[in-house]
Amino acid sequence: MKGQSKAISHGAATIVNAIATGKGAAFGVDLWTKAEVQLTNNPSVIEGEIVSDPTEKPVLIEKTVKRVLRHFGVEEKFGAKVKTWSNIPVARGLKSSSAAANAVALATVAALNKELEDLAIVNLGVDGAIDAKVTITGAFDDACASYFGGIVITDNVKRRIVKRFEIGEDLTVLFHIPPVKAYTVNADVARMKSVAHLVKTAYREALKQNFWAALTLNGLIYSSALGYNPAVALEALMAGALAAGLCGKGPAVTAVVSNDKVDAVKDALEAYEGEILQAKINHEKAKVLS
């Protein structure tokens, strides 16, 4: 048994939020979360630390490790000490939970010196996220985009990847991140489900590979349902963004931008209170680092 390992999984952004219909779409971005897992001889004792945001409770870390240990039938044999580092802001809709669950699950499997298929690792992370109550649907779409990169279109209820695509264009992704956190567990599910018939239209556009139209439409729909000001996204579009809309359940807004429009869109976003985060689209799969 190896006993210790480190892994990385990248970030993701919403194309279609799955909460309303159970079906979603997302794409990978090159933000990241790293996890380091050290197995111990203290069975069932999982000590988690979120180094990059110590104010956050490490419940997701603990639940994900427990899922992996239970999968291999060694929960009565091992405990673990786990640390995570990330440049993804927590509780803004930027898939911090999916990236963390992927990295922790992958590192734990490697620390046990075991191997699993990629989707099995993703599903252990999704189970951990559900156990930790940081997700409503399990966020299978976000987890797959985080783990595999590129664009994924999914059925979250069946945990099935419907389609996967790579993006050939060299595009920049800008996130407007308001200072206030918004936890998924507190989201108004009833309001989101009330617009399900509209979200289905965005999902159909994604299936037709009209990804950026789907992202913008989805963002406007969910902003309306959740009471967010759509002006941030609209200003980004007016400044030349290919797409702009609410990321996840918010409050962050994603703008997909051709490289020649980055400065103009950034200027538009900076008119609103918050931080601007810049990323690129990611196609790299999650991996073990040690």
Image (cartoon, helix red, strand yellow):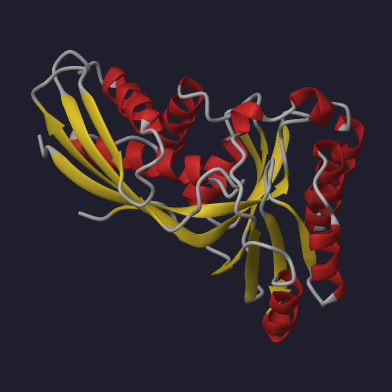
Q: Is residue 24 visible?
A: yes
x, y percent for residue 92: 60, 47
Q: Quadrant of the N terminus?
A: top left
Residue 121: quarter of image: top left
Residue 252 versus residue 162 in the image, above or below: below
Of the pair 64 and 222, the residue shown nearer to us:
222
From the top left corner, tell me how far across and down residue 60 is, in percent.
41, 31
Residue 159 seen from this side: no
Q: Residue at x 71, y 86 (%)?
A: 260
Relative placement, left or right, of 234 versus 257 is right
- 125 relative position to 28: left or right: left
Query: Which image quadrant is residue 175 in?
Result: bottom right
- Closest to the observer: 210 or 32? 32
For the point 51% across and 49% down, the residue is 146
Q: Is residue 67 left or right of residue 153?
A: left
Indicate whether 260 appears above or below 73.
Answer: below
